[in-house]
Image (cartoon, rainbow, N blue to C red):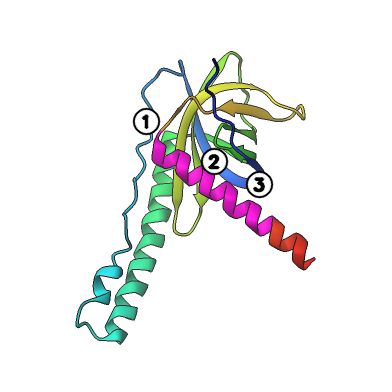
Amino acid sequence: MDRTEHYASVKTRIKGHSRICRSAGEEPMFRGFSGLKKHPSEDLDDSKVPEWLKVYVIEIDRKLDQLLGMQSKKDLTADFPVQLEIVEISGNGMLFKTDTEIQLPCCMEAVIEIEQIPLRLAGALGPIQPGSPSNTWTMKFETIREHDLESIIQFVFSEQRGQIRAVKLG
């Protein structure tokens, strides 16, 4: 019995970075941050720190996130030199475009920029096949960490809600 889960997909236009792999069984190079359960500013809520100082510290934290994100992106392009434009994504895989020539059969590890500021990434590894339309490629997510899968699914739901709001307001 096939136990493959089917996830909703959404058309999008986000960036990705990738590298060609020998096989789908290869150990992933990307080790993303699994995230904090709560934002550090929540620790300040119960403290006796003045409100103006809380605002200041939160703003510094936001700016540090931006700086660290820019540095991480530079490091990322060195390890994952193939640039992607992801045009559709789901928890199962993605449809993308790239200027890099791909030789089949091929397997790829991709790092997807779910958010640019602060930089939020998700990584997956899987086989590549020609897509439809003809200038696209598909990647099935065969190796993906639970946290990365959850991030992609949250992104899809968020995009779908935005599209529904746009239709209702339009």
Residue topped by disc 1: 29
Judged by depth in the image, the label closer to the viewer, 3 or 2, is 3
Q: Is residue 82 left or right of residue 73?
A: right
Q: CA distance from mark 3 to mark 1?
A: 25 Å
Q: Viewer-proximal residue, 85 or 132?
A: 132
Q: CA distance from mark 1 to mark 2?
A: 15 Å
Q: Viewer-proximal residue, 74 or 89?
A: 89
Residue furthest to the left in view is 48
Residue 43 image offset from top left, x and y in percent: 24, 69
Instruction: Inspect this view and state whether residue 68 appears.
Output: yes
Q: Which residues are magenta?
A: 145-163
Which quarter of the rendered picture does the N terminus lie within? Answer: top right
Q: Are marks 1 and 2 in contact (CB under 8 Å)?
A: no
Task: State the SS at label 2.
Answer: strand
Q: CA distance from mark 3 to mark 2?
A: 12 Å
- Looking at the rendered structure, which numbered label has been put on residue 12? 3
Q: Is residue 138 left or right of residue 142?
A: right
Q: Viewer-proximal residue, 149 or 60?
A: 149
Residue 36 image offset from top left, x and y in percent: 31, 54
State whether the magenta stretch is mostly helix, strand or loop: helix
